[in-house]
Amino acid sequence: MPNYARLHELVSHRVTFEYDTGAKIVGYIAACKPASGPVQVVVMSRVDILDDKGRVLEHHDEFSFVPNVLTNFRLTEGPS
């Protein structure tokens, strides 16, 4: 399992997050939340979201996301 607390050391560094689909999030870590301990949210700046071929799908001046391993997803509302 990744050491999420280590992300605190990478604030102000350009970092790439890679996913099993080949997609990537690349940008500068601006902040980690909470401020200490295991990171649950990363705030990034100058972010590109890339597909598996390296093409930019989106660009964001600021972008927040959960960097942790996804364990499940489920329908919360809508058609079943």
Image (cartoon, rainbow, N blue to C red):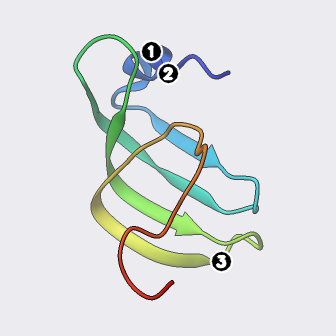
Q: Quadrant of residue 61?
A: bottom left
Q: Residue at x 35, y 76 (%)?
A: 77
Q: Amino acid at mark 2?
A: Tyr
Q: Residue at x 68, y 21 (%)?
A: 1
User: Can you identify the residue that label 1 sits on?
Assistant: 5
Q: CA distance from mark 2 to mark 3?
A: 27 Å
Q: Nearer the viewer, residue 47 or 75?
A: 75
Q: Is 15 left or right of 22, judged from the image as shown?
A: left
Element on which disc 1 rests: helix
User: Can you identify the residue that label 3 sits on?
Assistant: 55
User: Can you identify the residue that label 2 sits on?
Assistant: 4
Q: CA distance from mark 3 to mark 1?
A: 30 Å
Other-residue count near label 2 (Cα within 10 Å), few / some / many at <14 / 14–19 / ≥20: some
Q: Which mark lies nearer to you, 2 or 3?
A: 2
Q: Residue 66, percent across and down? A: 41, 44
Are dots 2 and 1 in contact, CB under 8 Å? Answer: yes
